[in-house]
Each structure stands twice: as structure tokens, then as C-alpha cells.
Amino acid sequence: MASQAENVVYEEGYVTSRGLQLFTCVWKPANQEPKALIFFCHGYGMECSITMDSTARRLVEAGYAMYGMDYEGHGKSAGLQGYVESFDNVVDDVSDHYTSICEKKENRKKLRFLMGESMGGAMALQVHRKKPEYWDGAVLVAPMCKVMGRIVISCCCHVFVYYFFVVFLYFLYVSLCSVMFFLAVFGVCVGFFLRSQLFLYGPPLNSDHHLLSFMAY
């Protein structure tokens, strides 16, 4: 699908990788050759075509072409939403697609830059590491390059406490339900017992009669 607004040409498409249909898009100048190519790597749970549209159009107005790709399980690409089985596989998907664009005849002499945001920063770095001499530079926006150990420990502690209380409340609920069920059954049994006693001996006429009935029983 292609559309043109003002001086921006926007195109969408799909590529197949590992049997998955992966969504791709590009913003490029309508009436001139781009002076450089920018390849965007989005963050976790994000996508390219909507969230980066305004940024891409501004870059096109400045004379650049911007390419995007939704990872496996993200945006309009195939796969379980939000699930990435192998980060290395996704890096290969991105690297192969962006490299294929750069290798087109009309793009071989153009400058090429990677741009990554959040987890996309880590993605851009990994793509760059595969071919360090291939790329002319990278722009990292709030990149998720490393998670500090104390943050991991803190998160683990919070998760442990949360699930501990969830399990505790669950067993407390089950225990209370069991006690209430036992009391209900006990009450029914007592009720049937008293009813049977009244059926056999009848209601007590007075305290002496009640005592004699009890002793006889």
C-alpha cells in the first residue's frame, strides 16, 4: 500500500522470515532522492507505522528516508503478541531486511544510519555489531542497553512478595470455605438428628418429661 501527502511518500509491505509475515514500511521524499537512509528499531510492545509517523515525516521533510519494521509478535507482524522466543532471531530479521534495502542499486552509495528507541536501542546496537563497518552511525533514544542488578533483585523481591500473598490468601480462602462447608454439613446433620428425635419421642411436655425421654433414650 502506498500513499502520498504533501512531499512524503508512505509505503507498506510484508517480508517473509522464518515462515512469518513481518510488516515493513517506509517514508521517503516524493520529489527528490534522500540524502541518507534511516532504519528505525522500535521498542518492546511498540510498532512503527503509527507511533513513528510524525517523527518520520519530519525527517523526510529534512531530506531523509526512514524505514521501519515490526518485529515478530509486534504491531502488524505475525506471531503471538508481545512474545519473542529468540532475540537473536529478531536481530537477524531486522539486519537481513535493512541490509537488503541498502544493497539495492539506488541505495548503495547513500549514507545509512540505525535509530533505536528503548529496547530498539539494544536492537540497533546488536544489528550494528553484526556488521560494524557497514553502518555509518546510530542514534539511540533512551536505549535499554542493560538492566542493573539491583533493579532485577528489587523486581524479584516484589514479585515474590506479591505471589506469596496471593498464594496465602488463596489457601486462607480455601480453608475458610472448607470450615464453612463442614459447619454447614454438621448443622444439617444435627438438624436431622433433632428432627428424628422429635419424630420418635414427640415434643417434650415439660422438663420432667424431657428428662425421662432423654434417660429412656
Image: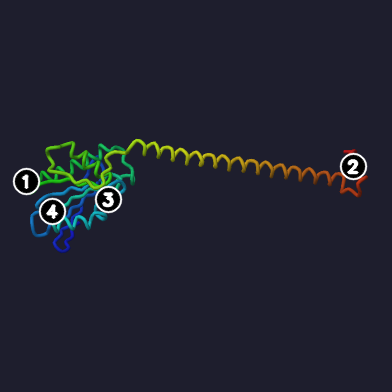
Task: Give SS at disc 2.
Answer: helix
Q: Residues within 10 Å of mark 1 (few under 14, many from 20)?
A: few
Tell me if label 3 and label 4 are in contact, CB under 8 Å. no
Residue labelled with disc 2: 213
Give the residue type that dot 2 points to: Ser
Residue labelled with disc 3: 47
User: For the residues marked 4 and 1, what is the alpha-carbon distance in whole angstroms?
Assistant: 14 Å
Q: Is tag 3's residue or tag 1's residue first in the polypeptide sequence?
A: 3
Residue labelled with disc 1: 109
Residue labelled with disc 4: 64
Give the residue type that dot 4 points to: Tyr
Tell me if label 4 and label 2 are in contact, CB under 8 Å. no
User: For the residues marked 3 and 1, what is the alpha-carbon distance in whole angstroms?
Assistant: 28 Å
Residue sitting at x 45%, y 38%: 160
Quarter of the image with the N terminus is bottom left
Up-down: is 69 above or below 1?
A: above
Give 95 or 190, whichever is nearer the viewer.
95
Q: How crowded is mark 2: few (under 14 residues within 10 Å), some or many (20 or more)?
A: some
Give 212 or 141, whichever is nearer the viewer.
141
User: For the residues marked 3 and 4, what is the alpha-carbon distance in whole angstroms?
Assistant: 20 Å
- Left or right: 113 as drawn, with respect to 144: left
Give the residue type that dot 1 points to: Lys
Task: Give SS at disc 3.
Answer: loop
Q: Where is residue 153 in the image (x, y as percent from the top left)?
A: 39, 36
Q: Is tag 4's residue or tag 2's residue first in the polypeptide sequence?
A: 4
Residue farthest to the bottom?
6
